[in-house]
Image (cartoon, coloured by chain):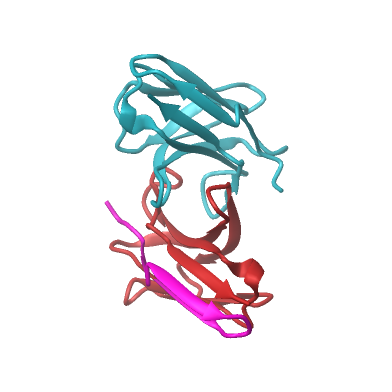
Amino acid sequence: ETGVTQSPTHLIKTRGQQVTLRCSSQSGHNTVSWYQQALGQGPQFIFQYYREEENGRGNFPPRFSGLQFPNYSSELNVNALELDDSALYLCASSMGLADYEQYFGPGTRLTVT
Amino acid sequence: SQQGEEDPQALSIQEGENATMNCSYKTSINNLQWYRQNSGRGLVHLILIRSNEREKHSGRLRVTLDTSKKSSSLLITASRAADTASYFCATDDNNNYGQNFVFGPGTRLSVLP
C-alpha cells in the first residue's frame, strides 16, 4: 500500500453531468499526475501538477481540468460526461519531475450511463 | 509522441519458471519504469532504470535497457502464483521532465500453480 489515497472508490454518473475526483498525495511529494485507464488498456496521461501549477497535459479535451492545493492534494474535474469517460482514474504522486518513481493510489472507478 | 509497447500481450507459465516481458519505445527517454497492476487496482512501482544504465536488479526482478534498440526487458525469475498481474513499462520524455509519461498496453502474466 502506498500513502496515496483517492476518493470516492466508485462513482456512477449520467451522461452530461460533472464529476470531481480527489487525490491525497504521499507525504513529502509535490507532484501529482492523473491517468485514465480504460478496461484492458494501459493508463493514459491526463495531466500533471507540480507545486500547484499544471506542468504538462496529455491528449484530453478542456472539459478535463484539475487543481493542486497547497498541501499538494489534487482534484480532477470532468464536465459534460460522455459514455467513453467510463474508466478507472488513477492519481500518482512523486517527489519531483525527473527520475522519480510514481506512487499510485487505488483509483476511482467511474461509470457513465 | 513516444509510446512503450509491451510484448507479448499475454503470457502463461508454470510456477517456478522464468517470465520475460519486452518493451519497445520510439524516441529518446530520460528513464524507463516498470509497474505491476493486480486486477484493476492501483499500479505498483517495480524498477526505474535511467537512460545511462544498462541493467538493474531487485530481488527476483532483472531489467535491462538497450537505448540503441529503444527496448527494455523485464525478467521475473522463479515465478510464483502471486506474480500473476499485468505489467506495464512507462517512459519519460527526455526533453520534458514529467510532462509526457507514457504507458504501454501491458503484458498480462498468468502464473499457474
Relative to A21, is B46 above or below? Answer: below
Residue at the image point whose x is 72% and y is 37% from the top: A27
Query: Which stretch appears magenta?
Result: B1-22
Relative to A100, is A6 above or below? Answer: above
Q: Is residue B10 magenta?
A: yes
**How far across and down, in percent of the image, does residue B35 sit?**
54, 59
Q: Place residue A52 in its image quadrant.
A: top right
Residue B31 in view: yes
Say left or right for B45 vs A35.
right
Instruction: Give the colour of chain B.
Output: red
**How far across and down, in percent of the image, does residue A77 sit?**
45, 21
Q: Is residue A61 magenta?
A: no
> How many numbered circles does the render carry?
0
**How far across and down, in percent of the image, does residue B109 sit?**
50, 69
Relative to A12, is A101 above or below? Answer: below
Q: Place residue A46 in its image quadrant.
A: top left
Instruction: Give the colour of chain A.
Output: cyan
Say left or right for B9 vs B14.
left
Residue at the image point whose x is 29% and y is 27% from the top: A61
**How far across and down, in percent of the image, does residue A56 sit?**
39, 36
Q: Place residue B91 in its image quadrant.
A: bottom left
Say left or right for B110 vs B25.
right
Residue lying farthest to the top in this orientation: A17
